[in-house]
């Protein structure tokens, strides 16, 4: 069986028609999103393709194979860092979820036009470049789908947080609110009545925000920067496939239409050598190490004072050593067993056998890497999908209460690795599949072409309602008529 799987993997890897020209559009300034986009594009380059990526970041470790051209969105990172200093993400974590969607949409809307209007992007649009396929990160930036028709290429979407409301509606994927919680909510699949009510209300609210608020604005950008392309809504629902950063070992099993492909874990790379100081610190920590990181967007240094003091007090009493991603030069009250680092190679750290626990914000990349390496997690969710990921961890592995959580983490890691083909090979195969089959229209379900009132059978429902009302009216009229005749008959009998 192992030999068969190895041969199948080789077939998938080398089953490529020719060197293709691929454009990737990944403009978000969140480093976690960039890691996923660049990992996919580098993987395609490593398989011999000619890759161009639009990004705010510049990759220094270029692929050894293929070509990897970078179109930098200069100024984006500086603006992001400026806003990061003005906003405290820990305080934003308490924002009402119904206010969070409009807030994020406002930021993404601004970023969408900044990308299209950027000088480097305009130079690309005005060039004679040709592409065989365009890959766009799906994150409410729907005008960017216009790159595909502009270059007369099939469109592929990459969802960095798996299936969600703004992905499902684009490919007509069913998503019952009875057991599938929205990505912004911290619910499990076993929701109470109140949770199902909130989930349904939030789903309707989000859908209305997208259709009435986001899509019209995105359509204006699309028409402005891609004036010769097909109508906006034709392109909006024209994705060949959607690559999902998800997997059944990480995410709740949910329905997928045929053109939705799981590739969760595709960004995880073989571990490299640790820096000497970290290697020694981890090797010498015989009692074990607790690794503490709040990800690439959150700043641990912005933790509220009372929470920071609580961590410091707890860490000082522990025999274990603590490795803490801390963005400042100094940590006031730093215990002797705590080592700081402004940047830490997370995958290499999690792979070390002395790491016994990972304290994290619960971001999907961190969750994926933790499951990959089989390390137990203590999640401190703040915002976005983090609360949902944390709830899944608690529900699936009972990490905070079950004494066997280490075995559970190892079992989850086993499920993650038990695949016929690796996630990167899966991603490459399907990108090449779309190229080979001219956009693979046969994978799209018919529901994507239906107007919303037909998809939800509202016209059928209205017809049935009219029939019921009319039938009730006729029935009442007939009943009344019969009753009237019977009454008249009785009166005649009495008179006689």
Image: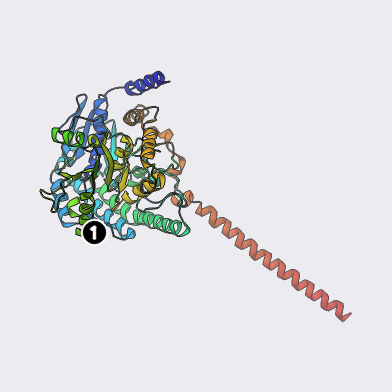
Number of numbered discs:
1
Q: Is residue 366 above or below residue 79?
A: above
The residue carrying mark 1 is 91
Q: Is residue 149 visible?
A: no
Q: Is residue 91 left or right of residue 387?
A: left
Instruction: Give the camera-side residue of 291 and 130.
Output: 291
- Residue under the point 13% across and 51% down: 331
Q: Is residue 290 left or right of residue 438?
A: left
Q: Quadrant of the N terminus?
A: top left
For the residue carrying disc 1, how many other residues have a C-alpha within 10 Å: few (<14), some (14-19), or many (20+)? few
Q: Position of residue 321 (x, y in %)?
A: 21, 43
Of all residues shown, which one is farthest toward the right?
496
- Residue under the point 19% across and 35% down: 284
Q: Position of residue 18 (x, y in %)?
A: 29, 22
Q: Is residue 4 visible?
A: yes
- Residue under the point 39% across and 39% down: 408
Report the colour scheme: rainbow
Q: Quadrant of the C terminus?
A: bottom right
Q: Position of residue 231 (x, y in %)?
A: 33, 45
Q: Is residue 337 left or right of residue 256?
A: left
Dot 1 falls on a residue whose secondary structure is helix
Q: Specify the quadrant of the image occupied by residue 40.
A: top left
- Residue under the point 43% across and 41% down: 253
Instruction: Give the camera-side residue of 137 and 277.
Output: 277
Q: Position of residue 42 (x, y in %)?
A: 23, 31
Q: Is residue 196 above or below residue 295?
A: below
């Amino acid at each position: 069986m192992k030999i068969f799987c190895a041969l199948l993997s080789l077939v998938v890897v080398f089953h490529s028609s020719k060197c293709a020209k691929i454009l990737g559009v990944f403009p978000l300034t969140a480093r976690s999103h960039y890691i996923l986009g660049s990992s996919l594009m580098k993987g395609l380059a490593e398989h011999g393709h000619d890759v161009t990526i639009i990004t705010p970041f510049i990759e220094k470790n270029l692929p050894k194979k293929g070509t990897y051209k970078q179109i930098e969105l200069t100024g984006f990172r500086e603006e992001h860092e400026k806003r990061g200093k003005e906003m405290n993400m820990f305080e934003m974590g308490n924002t009402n979820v119904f206010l969070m969607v409009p807030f994020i949409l406002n930021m993404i809307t601004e970023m969408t036009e900044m990308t299209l209007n950027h000088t480097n992007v305009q130079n690309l649009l005005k060039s004679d470049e040709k592409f065989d396929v365009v890959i766009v990160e799906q994150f409410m930036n729907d005008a960017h789908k216009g790159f595909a028709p502009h270059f007369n290429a099939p469109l592929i979407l990459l969802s960095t947080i798996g299936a969600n409301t703004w992905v499902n509606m684009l490919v007509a994927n069913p998503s019952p609110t009875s057991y599938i919680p929205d990505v912004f909510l911290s619910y499990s699949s076993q929701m109470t009545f109140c949770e199902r009510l909130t989930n349904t209300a939030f789903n309707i609210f989000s859908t209305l925000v997208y259709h009435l608020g986001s899509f019209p604005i995105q359509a204006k950008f699309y028409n402005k920067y891609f004036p010769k392309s097909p109508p906006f809504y034709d392109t909006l629902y024209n994705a060949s496939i959607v690559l999902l950063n998800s997997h059944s070992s990480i995410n709740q099993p949910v329905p997928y239409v045929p053109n939705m492909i799981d590739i969760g874990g595709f960004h995880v790379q073989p571990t490299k050598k640790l820096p000497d100081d970290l290697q020694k610190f981890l090797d010498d920590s015989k009692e074990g190490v607790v690794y503490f990181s709040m990800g690439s967007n959150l700043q641990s240094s912005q933790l509220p004072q009372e929470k920071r003091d609580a961590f410091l007090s707890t860490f000082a009493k522990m025999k274990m050593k603590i490795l803490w991603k801390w963005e400042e030069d100094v940590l006031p009250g730093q215990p002797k067993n705590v080592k700081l680092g402004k940047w830490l190679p997370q995958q290499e750290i999690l792979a070390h056998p002395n790491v016994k626990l990972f304290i994290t914000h619960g971001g999907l990349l961190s969750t994926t890497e933790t499951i990959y390496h089989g390390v137990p997690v203590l999640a401190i969710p703040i915002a976005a999908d983090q609360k949902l990921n944390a709830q899944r961890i608690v529900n699936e592995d009972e990490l905070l209460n079950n004494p066997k959580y280490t075995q559970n983490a190892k079992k989850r890691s086993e499920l993650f690795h038990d695949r016929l083909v690796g996630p990167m090979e899966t991603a490459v195969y399907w990108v090449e599949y779309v190229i080979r089959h001219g956009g693979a229209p046969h994978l799209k379900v018919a529901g994507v072409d239906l107007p919303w009132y037909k998809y939800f059978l509202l016209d059928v429902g209205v017809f049935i309602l009219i029939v019921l009302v009319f039938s009730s009216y006729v029935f009442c009229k007939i009943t009344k008529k019969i009753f009237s005749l019977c009454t008249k008959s009785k009166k005649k009998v009495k008179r006689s």
